[in-house]
Amino acid sequence: MNIQDITNNDFIQDKSSIWVLKQHKNFAYSDGAESEKYLEYVFTKAEDLSSSSTELESHIKDWPSEYHLTTKRARLFAGFDFDSSKKVLEVGCGCGAITRYLGETFNDVVSIEGSINRARLARLRTEELDSVSIICAPFQEIEFTRKFDIIFCVGVYEYSASFVAGEDPYHSVLNYFSNMLTPDGVIVIAIENQFGLKYFNSAREDHTRTQFEGLEGYHRHGHKVKTFGKYELENNLKEFFPTIQFYYPYPDYKLPSCIISDDFLSQGHAGELVSQIKSRDYYGELPKPWNEGLVSMELSKNNMLPFFASSFLVFAGKSQIEGVSFNQLAITTTSDRIKQFRTQTRIYNGRNGGISVSKKALSGKVIESNEKLSMIESNSNWNNTDSLQTLLFHNCMSKNM
């Protein structure tokens, strides 16, 4: 796509095929030059650049490379069915992990990134996808001449104060997004929860690396970055997007293995499921004074898990939410196994008012096997009780073991 055809700005297409806004001053946001050079090397040499590439995963060596190369990034949208004809705008595409998934899913994707090095990496990651166009520019300076059906904003909204001037940059950004959407358009926001349970249990804030920073109101770094609790985030969105649907990625939206619907998490059914998913401090584990899994189960009994979820995945519509569906209560993916034994588990409303569970191989085969192991598709009923592991753990704790 020629970006000049859908904007009123002047762009230059550089040798990497990204569209750079004339006189754009490069954003300083980066994981570091060494990290970005490594990604360039990996993307250039790789034969499989897809969002499900285990080849890329084999090059993970540290946290930055894990974030950009793991197949878990695209699992954020596991279980969602999108209308591929919708016109998509991605704001803050980074090095292209989500961009790659969007390009595989939709026919028309425009992705914006303020850092020229990261924009070029995103283009490398999507180089054979004609469905994707990459723009390097501040998103608020682009004057589009067309509207979009869906805007994806993954890990970006919290940085609004760093890139947008004004008394309330978070309000300004949502206003901009609303103006860029069609009358029935939808925005998709993935963001950490200010009151994520792990932050009460000594984990450092994901952006500032400071313990209790978000819980205390971002008094140190709030002029650059801040996340929100569920109530405040919903109120921010309501002015522009009256229809709002929350989902909950666990352990978080960055490396999700499970996506849970609001209905399932709010009704007290998901405590056992959530208790088995370990949260992560991305700057190294610190001693934890209490067991998050057991606390999660108690919170579930009191319908409080949504407030303490680590992350939110929000679909917000200017009218109704169209072009996307999530036809289950929750979905989990095992991404840490070897490829042929990776599975996807759907939890959904079954017949006669019960909850059903379906396990399938991601490969699509009914039976997967090697010389030692076999994996067979299965269907069962959901048992809303404590697992054997939980019962054993409770018993050990009661005996101070």
Image (tube, rainbow, N blue to C red):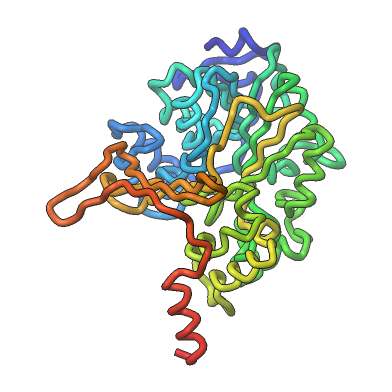
Say which residue appears at 34% left-offset and 49% top-offset: 378
Query: Which residue is at the front of the view, 202 or 11?
Result: 202
Quadrant, the C terminus:
bottom left
Residue 280 appearing in the image:
no
Q: How many marks?
A: 0
| Residue 113 image point, x, y percent | 58, 31
Say which residue appears at 84% left-offset and 41% top-offset: 168
Q: Is residue 288 above or below residue 104?
A: below
Q: Is residue 258 above or below residue 83?
A: below
| Residue 203 image point, x, y percent | 59, 67
| Residue 243 image point, x, y percent | 75, 35
Horizontal placement of 260 versus 339: left or right? right
Query: Which residue is at the front of the view, 76 or 134?
Result: 76
Residue 316 appearing in the image:
yes
- Pick out the residue farthest to the right: 167
Say which residue appears at 42% left-offset and 72% top-offset: 388
Query: Which residue is at the front of the view, 272 or 308?
Result: 272
- Pick out the residue farthest to the front: 352
Q: Is residue 381 above or below residue 399?
A: above
Horizontal placement of 161 versus 282: left or right? right
Say which residue appears at 53% left-offset and 77% top-offset: 287
- Pick out the residue farthest to the bottom: 399
Horizontal placement of 199 versus 229: left or right? left
- Pick out the residue farthest to the left: 371
Query: Which residue is at the front of the view, 207 or 261?
Result: 261
| Residue 234 image point, x, y percent | 77, 45
